[in-house]
C-alpha cells in the first residue's frame, strides 16, 4: 500500500445528492452532464434497494447487501480502492500506524485448534511465558475452538494495562496452565532486525512503512556505523509499502538535501506534488546494496527506485511488484471511510513503475500488463538505462529458490513447526542462532518423527501423467502405451519415496530456522538464514568486490552491461528523459 498524507482529505467534502445539483450550476456543460449521470444512477440504486427490501421473498440485511454492492463496484476499479466500514476502522488504523493494544503474539487457527505461532521478544506474551506451539483453549473464560481468527484477535486485543487470562495446553505438560498477560501498547517494528554480518558490513531489514519508519532506519544505520559498518545491506524484500512520507524520509537519509524523491500526479491537479529531500542526509557515500523481491511493493519501490535512479545503491534480487499508485483516505458518513486511488507516482528518473493497467480491461474483464515492447527507457543520473511500466529491476538478478514438493507439504501441514515445539521442550538450550546446526542424527530423529504422518502429495510430473492418461483413454490410445506409462509412474513414485533424503539440505535448513525461533525469537530466525540465503550471499559478494560495485553503478562498463535492464536494449545506455 502507499498512502498519501492527509491533505487529500481537505478536498471534496460533502457529496450528498442535493450537493450535486448545486455544483452543476457552477461547472461547465460537460460537468453538468456528468453530475446528472451521477445523481440519476444514485437515485436508481436507492429506489432499487427500496423495492428489493420491500418485496424480496426473504429478509434482506441492509448493511450486508449495500456493502456487497459497494465492494463489487470498487472491485471494478483496482484492488486498492476499498470501503472501510466502521467496524473495520481499528484494523485499518493498526495497519497504517503499526500500533494496537494487545499482547504481542501471532495466533492462528489450525484444524480447529488455536495455536500460538510466534511471541515477540520483549512484548507481554513473551514476558508472561507464552510459547510458540501453545494451544489456547479459552480467553477470559471464552472457549475459542469454534471462534474464527478475527474473533480470537478481538478477544486478545484490548486497552493497555488490562489483563487477559489464557488457558493453554503445552507439549510435555499433562494439565492445561493459566497464563495472565497484561496487555500493552504494541508498536510493530518497521525495522525488525539490524546487526553486523562481517566486521565491516552491516545489515538491516525494513518490513513496513508505518509511522516513524524513517526514524527507525536512521537509528539502525547509526548503530551499525557505531559498530564499525563501512558498507550496508538494506533488505526490503516482501515489504508491501505504507506511508508515502516515510518513503521520502528513508530516501532522504541517503541522498542530498534538495533532491527530488517522488512526484504524484492525478485527476485533481491541486493534489499533484513533488516531494523533495528536505533534511540533511545521514550518509551519501557509504556503499549500499538493496535486496528486493517480487513482493516488494509501493513505498518499497519508491525507496529502491530512488536509490537506483541516483546511482546510490546496487539492487540485488528480483524485479519488484510494480505498484505505482497512491491512495488517500476520505471520510464518509457514520464513521466509515473510503480508501481511494488518487494518483500515480513518478520517481526521479521520470518513470512510473505501475505494471497492471486497471483502466483498460478486456471484454471479459481481465487485466493486462504493460508489454515489454511498450515500456519506455529512462536514464539514471549516471546514464544507466531503466524502464517504466513493470516494477524496479535489480542490477544483479537473484532468483528465489523453488522449494521441493516434499518441503512444501512439511510446511503446509506444520510438521516443521510442531517438531520445533517438541524439540524446544526436550532441549532447554541450544547454540547461538548463527552457530546452531542439526546433526545427521538430529535429522534422522525428525525423519523418524514423520513415520505414520501423512506426507502424501502429488508431484507436477504425477499430475501430468494422470492428465496424459485421461487424454489417451479418451482418444482410445491408452492400451498402446499403458506399459510404458505405468513404468514411468513407478519410477517417479520410487524417486518420491526418497525425497526426505534427496532434499535433506533444504529441509534441514528450514527446520533449523524454526527451532532457532523458539529460543531466539524473530531476530534469531533471521540470523539463522545468513549462511545460506542466496540474496545475502550475493549482496556480500558485491560489497566485497569494490571494483564490481563501482562498475555496476556506471554506464558502459562490462558489469553495467550485464544488468537485466541493460540487456533489454543491448547496451548500458538508455533513452528517455529525467
Image (spheres, grey):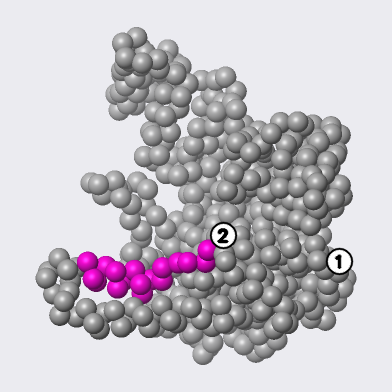
* Mark 2 secondary-structure assignment: loop
Instruction: Give the residue drawn at x 26%, y 79%.
Output: 485
User: Is 543 drawn above or below residue 416 in the view shown?
Assistant: below
Q: Under tag 1, what secondary structure?
A: loop
Instruction: Return the x and y of residue 539 as percentages of the image width and height.
Output: 65, 79
Q: Is residue 163 left or right of 211 when viewed as pictured?
A: right
Indicate which disc residue 413 carries.
Answer: 2
Residue at the far left in the pictured view = 476
Q: Which mark is residue 428?
A: 1
Q: Is residue 408 above or below residue 24?
A: below
Q: Using the numbered discs, state the Cα–Cα distance from disc 2 to disc 1 in whole angstroms.
A: 25 Å
Does the magenta-highlighted stretch encompass residue 350? no
Looking at the rendering, the stretch of residues picked out in magenta corresponds to 454-470
Q: How many marks?
A: 2
Q: Is residue 340 left or right of residue 236?
A: left
Q: Extreme top residue here?
A: 54
What residue lies at 78% left-to-right and 39% top-to-bottom?
166
Residue 322 makes an appearance in the image? yes
Magenta: main secondary structure: helix
Compared to 371, does 558 lie above or below? below
User: For residue 439, which quarter of the picture?
Assistant: bottom right
- Picture residue at 48% right of the left edge, 71% below the top: 405
Chain-order first, disc 2 or disc 1: 2
Q: Assess whether residue 466 is covered by the magenta stretch.
A: yes
Number of other residues with Cα within 10 Å of mark 1, as a class: few under 14, some 14 to 19, many 20 or more: few
Question: Are the residues tagged 2 and 1 within 8 Å (C-beta)?
Answer: no
Where is residue 106 shown, x and y percent of the image? 69, 49
Amino acid at each position: 500500500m502507499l498512502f498519501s498524507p492527509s491533505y487529500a482529505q481537505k478536498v471534496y467534502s460533502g457529496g450528498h445528492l442535493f450537493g450535486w445539483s448545486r455544483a452543476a450550476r457552477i461547472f461547465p456543460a460537460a460537468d453538468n452532464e456528468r453530475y446528472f449521470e451521477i445523481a440519476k444512477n444514485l437515485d436508481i440504486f436507492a429506489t432499487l434497494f427500496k423495492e428489493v427490501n420491500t418485496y424480496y421473498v426473504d429478509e434482506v440485511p441492509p448493511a450486508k447487501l449495500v456493502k456487497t454492492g459497494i465492494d463489487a463496484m470498487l472491485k471494478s476499479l483496482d484492488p486498492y480502492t476499498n470501503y472501510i466500514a466502521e467496524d473495520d476502522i481499528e484494523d485499518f488504523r493498526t495497519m497504517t500506524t503499526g500500533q494496537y493494544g494487545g499482547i504481542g503474539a501471532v495466533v492462528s487457527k489450525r484444524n480447529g485448534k488455536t495455536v500460538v505461532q510466534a511471541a515477540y521478544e520483549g512484548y507481554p506474551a513473551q514476558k508472561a511465558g507464552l510459547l510458540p506451539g501453545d494451544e489456547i483453549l479459552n480467553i477470559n473464560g471464552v472457549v475459542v475452538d469454534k471462534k474464527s481468527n478475527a474473533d480470537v484477535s478481538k478477544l486478545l486485543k484490548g486497552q493497555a494495562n488490562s489483563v487477559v487470562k489464557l488457558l493453554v495446553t503445552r507439549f510435555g505438560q499433562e494439565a492445561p496452565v493459566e497464563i495472565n498477560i497484561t496487555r500493552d501498547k504494541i508498536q510493530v517494528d518497521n525495522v525488525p532486525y539490524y546487526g553486523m554480518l562481517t566486521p565491516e558490513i552491516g545489515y538491516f531489514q525494513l518490513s513496513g512503512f508505518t509511522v516513524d519508519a524513517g526514524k527507525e532506519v536512521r537509528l539502525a544505520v547509526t548503530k551499525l556505523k557505531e559498530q564499525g559498518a563501512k558498507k550496508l545491506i538494506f533488505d526490503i524484500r516482501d515489504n508491501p509499502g505504507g506511508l508515502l512520507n516515510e518513503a521520502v524520509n528513508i530516501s532522504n537519509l541517503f541522498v542530498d538535501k534538495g533532491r527530488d524523491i517522488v512526484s504524484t500526479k492525478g485527476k485533481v491537479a491541486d493534489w499533484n506534488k513533488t516531494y523533495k529531500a528536505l533534511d540533511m542526509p545521514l550518509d551519501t557515500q557509504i556503499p549500499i546494496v538493496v535486496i528486493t523481491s517480487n513482493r516488494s511493493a509501493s513505498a518499497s519501490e519508491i525507496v529502491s527506485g530512488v536509490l537506483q535512479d541516483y546511482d546510490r545503491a546496487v539492487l540485488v534480487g528480483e524485479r519488484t511488484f510494480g505498484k505505482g499508485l497512491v491512495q488517500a483516505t476520505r471520510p464518509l458518513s457514520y464513521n466509515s471511510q473510503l480508501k481511494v486511488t488518487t494518483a500515480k507516482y513518478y520517481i526521479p528518473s521520470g518513470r512510473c513503475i505501475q505494471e497492471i493497467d486497471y483502466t483498460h480491461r478486456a471484454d471479459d474483464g481481465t487485466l493486462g500488463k504493460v508489454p515489454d515492447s511498450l515500456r519506455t527507457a529512462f536514464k539514471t543520473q549516471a546514464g544507466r538505462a531503466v524502464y517504466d511500466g513493470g516494477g524496479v529491476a535489480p542490477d544483479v538478478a537473484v532468483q528465489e529458490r523453488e522449494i521441493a514438493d516434499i518441503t512444501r507439504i512439511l510446511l503446509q501441514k506444520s510438521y516443521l513447526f510442531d517438531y520445533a515445539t517438541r524439540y524446544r521442550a526436550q532441549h532447554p538450550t541450544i547454540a547461538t542462532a548463527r552457530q546452531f546446526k542439526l546433526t545427521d542424527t538430529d535429522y534422522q530423529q525428525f525423519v523418524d518423527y514423520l513415520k505414520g504422518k501423512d506426507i502424501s502429495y502429488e508431484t507436477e510430473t504425477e499430475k501430468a501423467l494422470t492428465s496424459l492418461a485421461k487424454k489417451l483413454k479418451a482418444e482410445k490410445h491408452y492400451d498402446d502405451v499403458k506399459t510404458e506409462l505405468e513404468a514411468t509412474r513407478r519410477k517417479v513414485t520410487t524417486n518420491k519415496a526418497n525425497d526426505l533424503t534427496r532434499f535433506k539440505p533444504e529441509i534441514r535448513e528450514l527446520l533449523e530456522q524454526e527451532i532457532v525461533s523458539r529460543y531466539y525469537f524473530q531476530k534469531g530466525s533471521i540470523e539463522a538464514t545468513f549462511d545460506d540465503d542466496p540474496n545475502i550471499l550475493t549482496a556480500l559478494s558485491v560489497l566485497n568486490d569494490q571494483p564490481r560495485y563501482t562498475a555496476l553503478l556506471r554506464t558502459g562498463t562490462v558489469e553495467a552491461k550485464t544488468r537485466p535492464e541493460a540487456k533489454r536494449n543491448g547496451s548500458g545506455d538508455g533513452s528517455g528523459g529525467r
